[in-house]
Amino acid sequence: MSMAGKARIRLKKKAINLVYKLAGIISLGLGAAGVMLPLLPTAPFVLLSCFCFSKGSPSFHKLIVSSKLYNRYLAQYVETRAMTIRTKLSICVTATVLIGLTIVFSTFIWIHFIVVCLLLFKWYYFFFKIRTAKEDSVAVLPTAK
């Protein structure tokens, strides 16, 4: 392969890595915003950012995977596709309180209906679709320092 062909391949790889990094940063920002905004989910955006960072930059991926937020709420689910009752309740109660604020501050009945449907679906999904792991079977995952 010629030098120009190799340079073109390197440039293409750098461009693809840049797209993955930008998508990772945007999805991580949306995940962080989801902590405060009731209707924006956090976990899917953090998982998406992990995927994008792992494709675009191993160092960014390592940073995300070593975070306390990831290890506390997502690491076990990513590895076993299961959560403990404590983790499910922690996520659901927090999200319900924050999403419930929408009902308090909204005067539109159709928004109340949508929020209640969303809350019901969230509780159903967490407790009937995600497997429940036993507390004693959960391994403590070390965080990188």
Image (cartoon, rainbow, N blue to C red):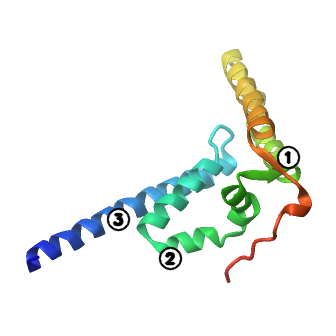
Disc 2 designates what residue? 59
Residue 59: % across, % down: 50, 76
Residue in the foreground of this view, choosing between 13 and 29: 13
The relative height of residue 68 versus residue 77 in the rendered view (above or below) is: below
Which residue is at 68% across, 63% downward? 70
Residue 127: % across, % down: 81, 38
First in residue order: circle 2 vs circle 3 = 3
Disc 3 designates what residue? 18
- Three-letter amino acid code at disc 2? Ser
Residue 121: image quadrant is top right
Whole-number angstrom distance, CA of label 1 to CA of label 3 = 37 Å
Disc 1 designates what residue? 89
Residue in the foreground of this view, choosing between 33 and 61: 61
First in residue order: circle 1 vs circle 2 = 2
- Three-letter amino acid code at disc 1? Leu
The relative height of residue 143 versus residue 129 in the rendered view (above or below) is: below
Which residue is at 79% across, 38% downward? 96
Which residue is at 75% across, 25% downward? 116
Mark 2 falls on what kind of element?
helix
Whole-number angstrom distance, CA of label 2 to CA of label 3 = 14 Å
Apparent side of residue 66 relative to residue 2 in the rendered image (left or right): right
